Image: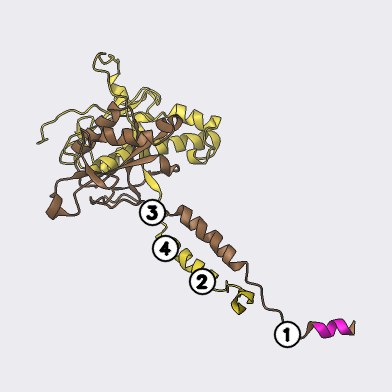
Chain colours: A yellow, B brown
Amino acid sequence: MARKSRKIPEINAGSMADIAFLLLVFFLVTTTMDQQKGLRVQLPPFPDPNVPPPVVEQNDRNVLEVLVNSGDQLLVERKPLRINQLTELTKRHIQNEGRLPNFADSSQAAIVSLKNDRGTSVQRYVEVYNELIRAYVEARDEYALNKFGRSFKDLPKKSDQALEVQKKYPMKISEAEPVEYSSSN
Amino acid sequence: MSKFKKNKGKELPAINTSALPDIVFMLLFFFMVATKMRDPTVLVKTSLPVVSEVEKIEKKSWVNHILVGPPINTAKSGTAPRIQFDDKFGMVEGANGVQAYITLKKNEHPEGVRDYLTTAIKADRSVKMGLIQDIKQELRKINSLKLLYSASEGEVIE
């Protein structure tokens, strides 16, 4: 009887902050803020087996043929090349504008065709891809700097200026249909 | 006036900390939301290639991962590169294949955004392109053409 009349004591909430801090520290430690990074690539659609592939007249000079063999060696236009020269050569190809006879007519027509063997390592393939993308990034930057006084990545996205640069240097890197090559070169 | 002063006393009042738990809880909820708990157990080793021209993907929920690499548990699974979806091994083709997995993942998203889904291939640098090519062909067959070769950012060392 006497117990009922007693007042319920207030719950001491002083340690609540401690508990919350404990949980906070746990989540702070477990949170991974890793970002998804990598080379973004658009694959060509799968060819319809009922429709014959369209015959595209592609002027040979507009296509820069890059081949990585199973030994991770680089062949550009059937000639061996070191990977640190690839960016320079690709840039010369897309910025040629018809000057040299074995490079592209214009930047819009330029195509880079990347072929690889089944034995190529991912490391080398991604590296080569990176060099090709770097060539385009640098070419776009130079064009944007000349024309608008700002590098391409500083131009606002989807702005007229950015679109113009993209139109001038469309990134045409074609991953060729898989072809079987002999494993020994 | 003098009576008022007398009542107040001399010592400083204690700082009111009753709002502290609220602040801490606010931070707590932020980190709880930001934490991704569904980290799948990694069955394959993926040390990514290092390249300079990486792009970040903002919408993480629109990325599906395919891990390719040599198994970590070599005694059980051998040393040949394997494909991993979520937290189990998969194949290139068939019921446990790339097409089935990506289609499953696509169906988790509303129809409007399905075309924006990206497949991230997290491949170990030692993996041969033959396997990656097979995966790429499977992706092309179901028309998921956005691809990301996962890589870490850094300077390329020759």
| Residue at the spot of label 4 | A29
Pointer 3: residues within 10 angstroms few (<14), some, or many (20+)? few
Q: Are marks 3 and 1 in contact (CB under 8 Å)?
A: no
Query: Are tags 2 and 1 found on a single chain?
Result: no
Question: Distance from label 3 to label 1 (Cα)?
Answer: 49 Å
Between residues A79 and B94, which one lies in front from this camera angle? B94
Q: Amino acid at mark 3?
A: Met
Residue for point 27% across, 20% down: A47
Callout 4: SS:
helix
Q: Position of residue A164 (x, y in %)?
A: 50, 28
Q: Residue under circle 1? A: B11
- Looking at the image, tell me whether mark 3 or mark 1 is earlier in sequence order: 1
Marks 2 and 3, how far apart at CA: 23 Å
Labels 1 and 4 touching (C-beta < 8 A): no
Sequence order check: which comes first, mark 2 or mark 4? 2
Indicate whether B158 appears above or below A28.
Answer: above
Q: Which residue is mark 3?
A: B37
Q: Which mark is residue A21?
A: none
Label number found at residue A18: 2
Mark 3, chain letter?
B
| Foreground tag (2 vs 4) | 2
Query: What's drawn in magenta, residue-wise?
Result: B3-7
